[in-house]
Amino acid sequence: NDEVEEEEDTIGNEHGSEGKSLKRKRNVYMFSQKFDSYSDSIKHLKSDFVNSTSCQAKLYILCSDFDTSVSIYLGNFDHDHSINKAPFGINALTKELIENLYKSNLTTATAIRNGLRDRINPLMPKVLDSDPDVINKLYVPEIEIPNIRQINNYLQQTLRSHLFGLNHGRGFTHADLENWASSKLTVPDNDHTPFVIDYSIQVNDRIPSLSKLKIVITTKKLLEIAMKTKHICADATYKLMWHNLPVLIIGTTDTKKRFFPFLLSICSNETHEEFCFIFSSLKKGLLAIFNFEYKPDTLIADGAEAITNGFMECYGYSSVNEFNRVMCWFHMKKKVEQELKKNFGDESLIKKIEADVDKMHYAFDSNIFFICVKLFMLKWKKMEGTDKFLDYFKKEWIESTNCGWFEGKALNCPSTNNALESINGKLKLNTLRKRMAFSVFLTNAYSTVSNWSMDTVKEKIFCDEYDISGESWSLAYSFLTVNDRVIKKVPNSTTFLLTKKEFKDELNMDYAKGLYSKLNNDFDQLVALFKNVRIIKFNKDSWVCSSCTCSYYLRNYFCYHLIVVAVVKKLVEIPNKYKKCSIEPKAKRGRKANAAKALVRQ
């Protein structure tokens, strides 16, 4: 028979009897072609195949029971590809807007839908029909308002998985990390393309949570900055990944006190082993790429012994006395405030002790610092009830490795780790303050390191020269033009003393020469001495590299006192635009007339 009819489909009910028919359009198939094999028929059909779910044309393939031949029967409906498929789901523009709203802290479907409503109309809604038209600044053309279920499905199945990883990234394995890290070991030609300096993965098969991993990411441009300085800032931050892994960052600061990271590292722990690995990776990268032997002499960090021990092990220091270990002043001060509140209830007493600790912070070298500490202890021992605090202070902040919290510990270096702490805050902003999956954060960290590198080209250029502000020039001129200034040179040295005439009696050669043990001052007198009398150690070769004992210099690496000495030595002239002197009338020729007698007009 050349015709094949398609019968109606029926569905039986639960009692087994015939139920309601599922009506379909009746299709009558007519013989079209015959092929020797099934594969030949498929080849023929594929050559004319058009993918369309809306076309109602159909065909029937009948395989013979007696041989391999195949017959093709075509249905009685013609091809119709003009019917367009109805749009389905949320369009791309609306999805992009939903992602932006989600990132702006609208995290529920209802809040997102309300946010879309605010953007769908080009004009603001009117209160009265007579009100003028006001343009809606939030209007976004061609967006749609999905229903709550659609938004929820998009958030759960697509957006959150994209931002934070599927199942919080628990599917990312050590093998995946090994493959990713090994593919990034090649040093790229581009200065701003990140790569992996070194990595280490030790898998614990029995207890996977005890596995150890260390991976260090950087760029060539960031490594170049390390060659320009001798001090390192190091710190770790948490709450970036669901795995509770610390992210370790090391870098440096320039003369403007801006932080420049060298690298970013993801580790399983925060022990001296991890920090030693990171410092060694930095050393290894500089030697391999730039043939540069790197050995910094100053470490700036909080009180973590792991950072100190890792630094010493990497760079071969056997004692903390062989390098400058700067304790972050902010962390130290915070701990001391907590201890004071724990031991004393008198708020005025707490403020007085805090003020004395602040004064010791501005000690300009180690010798004067330890003399200040000795006098500080003598001063407060006289008061009853202070023994417990003084014992704590001596043990934690004087006799330990955390004693480097004063400004003079390392000149031209910051006394806090605040610049690095700000980078930690920006990292958390990049993750929307949400914990990411490991794989997602790894991608985020890779792009972050690249952005750090590109920022050093224009936005944040590393500065190794001292910036002399207009205020410094003006203050130097004011000091040189007043009558009560005192500028004295210490014989047979390049040291100068600057003060005012009212403090002239405090000038002391033992103090100027660093013979502090010969001073017979109490704590308050000694603090007043290095506040009133400035000691400038002048550098003949580069006067801007001279040093001063004033607090402004200790914080900013430059002060107007250096300009004063340079002007006295005739090495520099103050520009006229900073000479704030009034214009006087022109003097008349000849000798001035003597004053006339009383009551005689002159």
Image: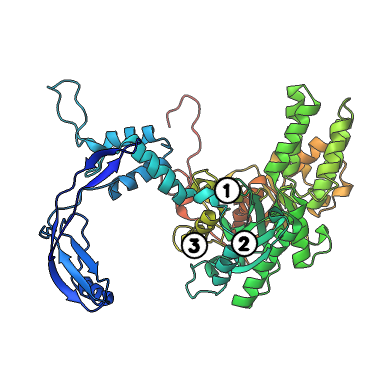
Q: CA distance from mark 1 to mark 3?
A: 18 Å
Label whose residue precedes the other's in the sequence (2 or 1): 2
Residue at horizontal 55%, vertical 65%? Answer: 222
Q: CA distance from mark 2 to mark 1?
A: 19 Å
The spot of residue 75 in percent (x, y) is 14, 60
Residue at horizontal 89%, vertical 31%? Answer: 387
Give the residue number, with chain letter if any, for mark 3.
450
* Quadrant in the picture for the N terminus: bottom left
Relative horizontal placement of residue 414, taking residue 336 as reference (left or right) = left
Q: In the image, which disc is placed on residue 15?
A: none
Type of residue at label 1?
Leu
Give the residue number, with chain letter if any, for mark 1.
240
Residue at horizontal 54%, vertical 48%? Answer: 168
Examine the image and state in which quarter residue 378 appears: top right
Front-most of residues 35 and 517: 35
Give the residue number, with chain letter if any, for mark 2.
174
Front-most of residues 70 and 59: 70
Relative horizontal placement of residue 28, taking residue 419 as reference (left or right) = left
238, above or below 213, in the image: above
**SS for callout 2:** helix
The spot of residue 301 in percent (x, y) is 70, 51
Front-most of residues 101 and 531: 101
Crowdedness near tag 3: few (<14), some (14–19) or many (≥20) residues, C-alpha within 10 Å: many
Tag in front: 1 or 3:
1
**SS for callout 3:** helix
The spot of residue 529 in percent (x, y) is 76, 42
Label whose residue precedes the other's in the sequence (1 or 3): 1
**SS for callout 1:** loop
Crowdedness near tag 2: few (<14), some (14–19) or many (≥20) residues, C-alpha within 10 Å: some
Q: CA distance from mark 3 to mark 2?
A: 24 Å
